[in-house]
Image (cartoon, rainbow, N blue to C red):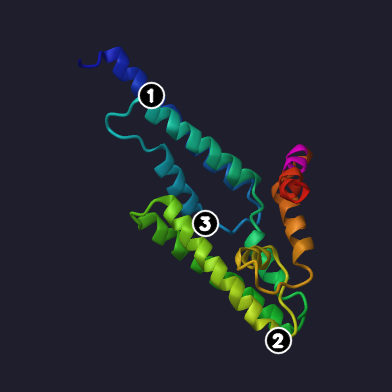
Amino acid sequence: MPLSNQEKQERFRRKEELAQKAKDLFIQWQVTRGFDFSQSPSEVNSQLTKIVELPSKWTDEDYQAALFKLNLFERNLLSNNPHLLENDIWAGRQQDNSVESVRNGKEAIANARTHVHLINSTFGLSPKRTSDNAAVIMEVARNLGLTLLSEATKGYIPRSNATTVCLLLSSPYLPKPKWLLKAIADFLKEQIPTPEFRKELAAMLTADSEK
């Protein structure tokens, strides 16, 4: 059945309202982002445009899905620490404060950002499921964990959230650095700020050992 003029106007209003929400979020991010260079304005704007883009014959389900994605994107964009990448790179150099290390660290951050953008672009063009892409990242992290362990002959394994996750994902039967358990606990505290959830996790981790 053809839509009435009133229904067409309502659909247009809702679509414009969704697009305006994306524009408002983009402006809010630009105002509050400070020194957040983890994403360029064009990248954020492109992601927002893609989120609120509705199919030609969109349904209310399509609209609600776009709104959900937009709200999720907003929470991540405005609450996430934009310096996590830099923090991991500097943490990996904490035992070397030489001028050369600092200079190389700045270069490494720039290179890392480029690599992240390339990987994200590759996944964006990939026909694979997002869960398949997640599996790819996991396999890469496992391989990096093994590489970190093989480099322990240099005297130490750099400690950061990034190396912690990679070592955690490597085989449980491989020798791990003494600091790993504390690093895992610190990492989980950052990711699970709610005390109740921490208690639930602790109970799950100790459940098998108590049987």
- The region drawn magenta spans 196-200
Seen in the picture, residue 67 relative to 27 is either above or below; the reply is above
Crowd around label 1: few <14 · some 14–19 · many ≥20 (10 Å): few
1 and 3 marks in contact (CB < 8 Å): no
Decide if residue 107 is in sight here.
Answer: no
Where residue 37 sits: x, y (%)? 59, 59
In the image, taking residue 129 as reference, residue 135 lies left or right, namely: right
Residue highlighted by disc 2: 154
Residue highlighted by disc 1: 60
Decide if residue 122 is in sight here.
Answer: yes
Kind of residue at badge 2: Lys
Crowd around label 2: few <14 · some 14–19 · many ≥20 (10 Å): few
Main SS of residues in magenta: helix
Kind of residue at badge 3: Ser
Residue highlighted by disc 3: 40
Q: Is residue 3 magenta?
A: no
Kind of residue at badge 1: Asp
* CA distance separating discs 3 and 2: 37 Å
Q: Residue at x 69, y 49 (%)?
A: 191
* Callout 1: SS: helix
In the image, taking residue 15 as reference, residue 94 lies left or right, namely: right
Q: Nearer the viewer, residue 95 or 184?
A: 184
Q: How many marks?
A: 3
* Callout 3: SS: loop
Whichever of callouts 3 and 2 sits on the residue coming sooner in the sequence is 3
* CA distance separating discs 1 and 3: 32 Å
Whichever of callouts 2 and 1 sits on the residue coming sooner in the sequence is 1
Q: Residue at x 72, y 52 (%)?
A: 188
Seen in the picture, residue 146 relative to 23 is either above or below; the reply is below
3 and 2 marks in contact (CB < 8 Å): no
Q: Nearer the viewer, mark 2 or mark 1?
A: 2
